[in-house]
Amino acid sequence: MEKLRGLLNDARAWFDRLTTRERQMVLGTGGAVLAFVLFVILFSFSNSASNYRKRTDQKLAKLREVQMLAASYREAAQERQLVEQQLTGSNVRLMSYVEEKATQAGLTVPNMTPKNDVGIGDGQIVESSVELTFTDVDLRKLHDFLSMVESGPGVVKVKSLRLEPRDATETLTAWTTVSTYKMKQ
């Protein structure tokens, strides 16, 4: 403490020996140095606070992204469960189902060829298909038939359809593949 007082007294004595002009220059220089030091300190605090704000904003943006992904994952999981329930509950006997819907639409199926069951995806889903050929069929009846097939129980879809018009009789020849899907037991 004594050394500090001694240094202050020496500095005061040195300052008192200066002329008025030298004192003004020393005070001006000291003020400029003090202003520079305050500027550097405030700038570093501002920079540090800005960096913290940026990192916080980045983390909040990532959090919002995670929340959106979690919500979309939940929706996708619910849709998947719904489809799995449909596939698990699907026990459609395709041949008899197709014949029944054809009869309801006023059609006869002259040619129906079943295809072998095929595992799709990871093998947990089984696809059963039947190929149908209609000759000289009315377009409205064919439309009604295909609509009824797809609106039935379980997951039944018209997988392919090829049409060949017959201009003379205003009818069609149609080749179609109807498939049903179910979960492997």
Image: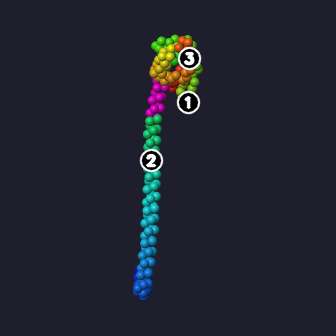
Front of the two marks 3 and 1: 3
For label 2, count other residues whose C-alpha is less than 10 Å away and answer few (under 14), some (14-19) or many (20+). Answer: few
For label 3, count other residues whose C-alpha is less than 10 Å away and answer few (under 14), some (14-19) or many (20+). Answer: some
What's the residue type where badge 3 is placed? Pro
Does any portion of residue 13 appear in the rendered image? no
The answer to the question of whether label 3 and label 1 lie on touching residues, with beta carbons closer than 8 A, is no
Front-most of 154 and 43? 43
Q: Position of residue 20 (x, y in %)?
A: 41, 85
Task: Tell me the magenta residue range.
Answer: 77-90
Can you tell which mark lies on residue 165? 3
For label 1, count other residues whose C-alpha is less than 10 Å away and answer few (under 14), some (14-19) or many (20+). Answer: few
Q: Position of residue 170 (x, y in %)?
A: 53, 14
Front-most of 147 and 45? 147
Does any portion of residue 38 appear in the rendered image? yes
Q: Position of residue 116 (x, y in %)?
A: 58, 20
- Structural distance between the alpha carbons of marks 3 and 1: 36 Å
Q: Earlier in the sequence, mark 2 or mark 1?
A: 2
Would you name the residue on which mark 2 appears?
63
Toward which corner of the image does residue 34 lie, by quadrant? bottom left
Q: Earlier in the sequence, mark 3 or mark 1?
A: 1
Label count reads: 3
Would you name the residue on which mark 1 appears?
121
Front of the two marks 3 and 2: 3
